[in-house]
Each structure stands twice: as structure tokens, then as C-alpha cells.
Amino acid sequence: MALSVVIMAAGKGTRMRSARPKVLHALGGKPLLGHVVATAEALSPDRCIVVTGHGAEAVEAAFAGAQRVFVRQMPQLGTGHAVQQAVPALADDDGITLVLNGDVPLIREATLRTLVDACAGKNLALLTVDLDNPFGYGRIVRTAEAGDADSIGAVQAIVEEKDATPLQRQITEVYTGILAAPTRLLKGWLARLTNDNAQGEFYLTDVVAHAVSDGVEVRTACAKDETEVLGVNSPMQLSDLERRLQRRHADALMEAGVRLADPARFDLRGTLACGMDVEIDVGCVFEGAVRLGDNVRIGPHCVIRDAEIAAGAVIHPFTHIEGATVGAGTLVGPFARLRPGATLGEEVHIGNFVEVKNSTLANGAKANHLAYLGDATVGERVNYGAGSITANYDGANKHRTVIGADVHVGSNCVLVAPVELGAGATIGGGSTITRTVAPGSLAIGRARQVAFENWERPKKKAK
Ligand code: UD1
Ligand code: MG
């Protein structure tokens, strides 16, 4: 049966107190709407219609995609009005329309499938949840079932907080904002909505009463886990959901054997694939796509983005890695920075305050202290001294430095690129190297030391 998805994302999100449209705020490194769209598209719908309004240009630009249709809702007159805007984009068939909220990001695919099954192309299916504190939510009003305490009555209506009687406000079964309906019937009910209520809005929730009066069965599916139906309306709720999402990630990793020093101090904003016996200390942030091989250890407070770290490598505290590859058994940090294009071989050592960019270091190369390697090719077992840098940029263009195997670069050298140091060469400390160094030779490029004997230091003038 044809499936259409309508995602409501036009609301202002006043309580975020932000210039950014609410659905573009990030959760786990991805916009709220991105989570909803990804889950919706996992259902392989025939069409996915996103209702935009507040910040429409920005939202549409961020989510342009082949299968997606955007419809604008201007002004925003309520959730029913939002779905009305999608009607022209809905197919004229016997399919099902699934309505999702752009600000309920952690809804699970399996739950949506259950809801669509409950609709079955003929019923109105509502996703509900039981909340200890139902304040602010639409309440599910059911008929009283006389005499049978176990059976629950049929759904009669959804009543919004502001329209509810004190008795109705005690109902803890609430509407999550997500429903599935036969497309043809939904269109008819939408056409009958009015804004005769406390907020003067066209409520999508009023379709329930219309379904009941048409004799259509209203079914409910209950979300198992409240996390998946929580909405984001404020920075506080966003941070609460962020921690819940991170806890999900942490639990999944720990179930796979990863040892996290503290799941409450772990952040994944992308994907993390781990081998066996991986250990991750507190305060680390993983972004983009990161892969860690067997026995990798990540020290506290590292930020790692789009990286591949091979078996047995150790990343010491406060290291920043982006777009880099780290070979097996390599040691990096503390306080190291690997920038895009850094490719480290096996058993490489990168120490504190060392920056590597767009450079390849072959097996066993070492740069242990206060150094910069940019646009360089570094051979096996090279020892790159403290304070040495590649001067790779002439103010207009970048040039390469090629360092052969077993080269020893002393401390505080400047290698002015383009330049090549032959295998086994030695560079004296403090040298500025501007010309090719032959293999096996010693190059020194610095002023000679001079001595003035019995040197008298300047003295302070008498006042
Ligand atoms: C809605 C439900 C309520 C439910 C709650 C669950 C209605 C009338 N009420 O209330 O029963 O318990 O969600 O979270 O539907 N939106 C638009 N255009 C508009 C208004 C809203 O696109 O004109 C979008 C918002 O961006 C948001 C979603 O619809 O993504 C829900 O709107 P919101 O104002 O948060 O509805 P609630 O009052 O929370
Ligand atoms: Mg809401």
C-alpha cells in the first residue's frame, strides 16, 4: 500500500529563544529534522512531504533531496492547518499517510511500522504514551467501560491541555503528535477542521472526533520507551534528549565490548566502529565517521573526527584528530593535533604540541615535541627534532618537503619547502634548510657562534 509521510516542521520554536529554526538545532551532531527524515526514509515511503514555514528557506536548503517535497505553511495556524498544506502533494489513492513531528527526533522505525500496521489502510492509528507528568500534552479521551476494569474504552477524542477539563487533565495517556491515517479519509477530516478552541488554531488532533463520528475505528499504538516520543521545545529539553541519545550510543558500544570510563561523559556525533578491547576515557567527542581497531586506547578529552585508528594505537589526553589515519601501535599526544591528510604508519610517535597536516609519516618515524609537519613526506625511522617546522607556505602557494628514511632533523630547524633531505642525512640543530641535502651528509645552515671574551654587561645608570 502506498505510503506518504508528512513531517510538520513549520513551527517557530519560540521557547528555543534562537534565531535558528528549531528543527535545525543539532542533536547528536545532526539537525533534529535530519533524525526524523532519516527514520521516515527508512520506511521507503512513496513520498516525503516536509511542511516548512518559520525559516523555510534555511530548512529547505538544508534538506533538499530527490524524494522530498516541501510545502510552505504561511502563516502557521496550527498542526491541522500544517497538514492541510500537504494535501495537494498527497497522492489520490487508497494509501496511508503517516504524520510526524519535526521536533520529535528519536522516534524509532519499528514503532512507526507498528503504527502503520495498526492503520492498515482503514483505521485511524494514534501513537500514544503514558506519562507520569502529562502536562502540556493532548490527552486521549476514551469511553468508560462499565464493569470491566481490564479493558480500556474506545478512543473518543484528543483534548489539548488548554481545552481540557480538570478531570481530563488527570488522564496520563497522551498523544505523541504522531498518527497514521487512510489518506482519502484524512483529507476529508482535514477539510472539516475548525479553529473553535482555546488557542484559535486548527488542531490536527480534531481528526479523531471526526473519525469517531464517521464510525472509523481509532486504534492506538503505545511507544515503549518515552525517549522516542519526547519533543524538543527548549534548550533544556534539547540537552536532556542529547544525554538520552548519548546514553543509547554508549550502551550499544558497551554491549559490543567497548570499555567506556564513564558513559555519562561520552559524546558521539556521527558513527563509531570499534574492534575488540577498545578503551575510551572520559570527555571524548567523536564526530563524523571514526573507526578504532582492536586494543586502541583513547585517553581523556580527545576530539576525533573522520579518522581511522589502527590496532593497538594509543591516543594520549587532549589530542585533536581530524581527517587522519593512524597506523598500528602508533602513539599520539598528549596535546597533539592531526589535521586532514595526516597519514601515520605503524609505530609512529607524535608527541606533545606537534601538528601534522597533509603529511605521510612512514613506519617508526618520530616527532616528539613542539613541531610542525605540513605537506611533507617523511621516511621510515626519521627523527624530527623539537621545535622544527616545515615552512610549507610562501604566502601564495604550498610546497612539499620530502624527508628520506633515517634522516635526523635536529631541534629548531626550518625546512623551507620545496626541499628534499636525502636518506640518512643529518640536519644540525637551528638550521634553516633551503637546498637539497644529499643522502648521508650533514647539513648545517646557521650563523657561526662568535665569542667576545671578558664581556662587560651594560649597567644601570645612576639616578
Ligand atoms: C501537539 C498536539 C498534542 C500532542 C503534542 C505532542 C495538536 C493540536 N496538539 O501539541 O496533542 O500531545 O503535539 O508533542 O496537534 N507545527 C507546524 N505548523 C503549525 C503548528 C505546529 O508545522 O502551525 C509543527 C511544529 O513545528 C511541531 C509540530 O507541528 O513540529 C507540533 O507543534 P506544537 O506547537 O509543538 O504542538 P503542541 O502544542 O506541542
Ligand atoms: Mg510541541
Image (cartoon, rainbow, N blue to C red):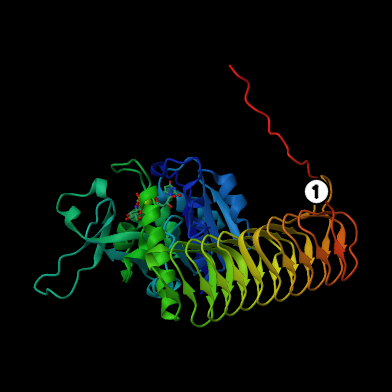
Q: In the picture, which quadrant includes the C terminus?
A: top right
Residue 458 in the image: above or below residue 214? above
**Closer to the camera in the image, 343 or 430:** 430
Kindly indicate the quadrant of the structure image that contains residue 177. Answer: bottom left
x then y, percent, for residue 252: 43, 75
Q: Is residue 329 left or right of residue 268?
A: right
x then y, percent, for residue 392: 80, 54
x then y, percent, for residue 37: 52, 62
Kindly indicate the quadrant of the structure image that contains residue 195. Answer: top left
**Closer to the camera in the image, 279 or 65:** 279
**Closer to the camera in the image, 158 or 24:** 24
Q: Residue at x 46, y 50 (%)?
A: 82
Kindly indicate the quadrant of the structure image that contains residue 388. Answer: bottom right
Q: Residue at x 38, y 68 (%)?
A: 262
Q: Is residue 62 left or right of residue 413?
A: left
Residue corresponding to mark 1:
449
Q: Is residue 240 left or right of residue 174?
A: right
Dot 1, how many residues are within 10 Å of its Cα: few (below 14), some (14-19), or many (20+)? few
Query: Mark 1 falls on what kind of element?
Result: loop
x then y, percent, for residue 81: 44, 48
Q: What amino acid type should be assigned to the residue bearing mark 1?
A: Gln
Q: Residue at x 37, y 74 (%)?
A: 118
